[in-house]
Amino acid sequence: MKAPGKKKFFIEDNVCTPYKLILNRAHNYLTMNGMFVTENRKEADTIIIGTCAAFQSLENTTISFIEKAQEEKKNDAELVIFGCMNGINPTKVKSYKPDRIIPASAWERLELLIDNPKIPLADIPEATRFRSDKDYRLPDYGKQFVLLQTGCSSNCPFCPHKMGIGKLKSNTPANIMKQINSMGDEVHTLCLTGNDTGSYGVDIGTSFPELLKKILATTNYHIHLSQINPNWVYYYRDELYPLLLDNKVREFQTLIQSSSNRVLVAMERDPVVEKIKPYLLKLKKERPDLILRTDLIIGYPTSTEEEELESAKYVAEIFHEVAVHGFERFSHSRIERLGLPFYEPSEINHRVQKIINYFADYPQLLVHHGGQVIESLEAIEKPKQYLRDKNNISLKCGGSL
């Protein structure tokens, strides 16, 4: 069933920032084509569940949303399952027999929810904020998000994200600058975001540093840079460094996962983390006000406790914030066919706690579990303000993950 005008829709999700922005754009598309939003599943003619399955905890939440929708929806209501779970666990999704499945990698198909729309999805401005306050960890309407790209240019064998988000798809520089130039006076911070932000532009003949240079030259906003893999830091190191020295850049996130060359090769990631260590140390020295953020994966197959401790030492020397992730298996991931020995979950949990305990000796470092433990993210903005105060970093605006 496709939804004509004058009907109601309900959206519930636990997706990451890029797809929250996309769902807000879809929300605006539906309302501008005559539908009405409702907060009551029982009233909705169309129920859209935005799904994430990047971690088992998030997949469990996703499943609870779907089951609640099935339990409460009207008999003639359309159930739409959107997002990454469609690529990560398609068998589970199909078991719920939704009326429509829209993968995250094909998000433009959200346009099909309306027959013959008066305003096509392409004409709906891209969203720079979330749909509601509950989507924020700490609401701050002066901070807006600019979605540079979706998808990923890497092909890590263990990663569920790539299965969900698909290949790199960059927005155009013209569209991005149009968004930024239309921001209101109340905006103080732009979070430049994506799934694999450093890869921006390689599919359309431009680059991340080229775009950032243009943004810094034409705006006075504070800039947060997120989701940048180390291979892009290394590849663009000469172009990127002077841009990171600009004091408008307030946060920089590069996701090292491990400092061990051997482990990074096993992950099929470029072994450049040690190569960029002098670069990051120099940056930290010249920009002591810049928040540096990263992620670690603990318990990766064949990774030793000694290698993980070296990675933790690397993090403690350079970064202000780290998300510590225990390795999780996903049945559809390519790593399952590589014949590697897997650690038991109890061993991984032990190692994660060991690394957390190690970081306890570094009070200047904000440590959390990321999306694996939802509660560790819910109030992350307030600890980050404490982090800034602890490190004498003077920033007026809150950060974003």
Image: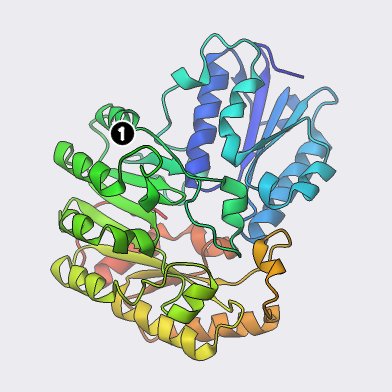
Q: Residues within 10 Å of mark 1 (few under 14, many from 20)?
A: some
Residue 28, image x, y percentages = 51, 23
**Amino acid type, label 1:** Pro
The quarter holding residue 157 reads bottom right
199 above or below 124? below
Task: Identify the residue shown where x is 30% and y is 51%.
Answer: 224
Give the side of residue 5 with respect to residue 312, left or right.
right
Quarter holding the N terminus is: top right
Q: Is residue 111 visible?
A: yes
Q: List x then y, in percent, for residue 7.
A: 68, 16
Occupied quadrant, residue 390: bottom left
Up-down relation of residue 29 to residue 89 (above or below): above
Give the x, y percent position of residue 211.
Answer: 26, 42
- Element type at marker 1? helix
> Which residue is nearer to you in this view: 23 or 162?
162
| Image point (19%, 64%), residue name | 289
What residue did someone put label 1 on?
173
Question: Image point 71% across, 45% down: which residue?
Answer: 65
Task: Name the quarter where the C terminus is drawn.
Answer: bottom left
Q: Position of residue 44 (x, y in %)?
A: 72, 25
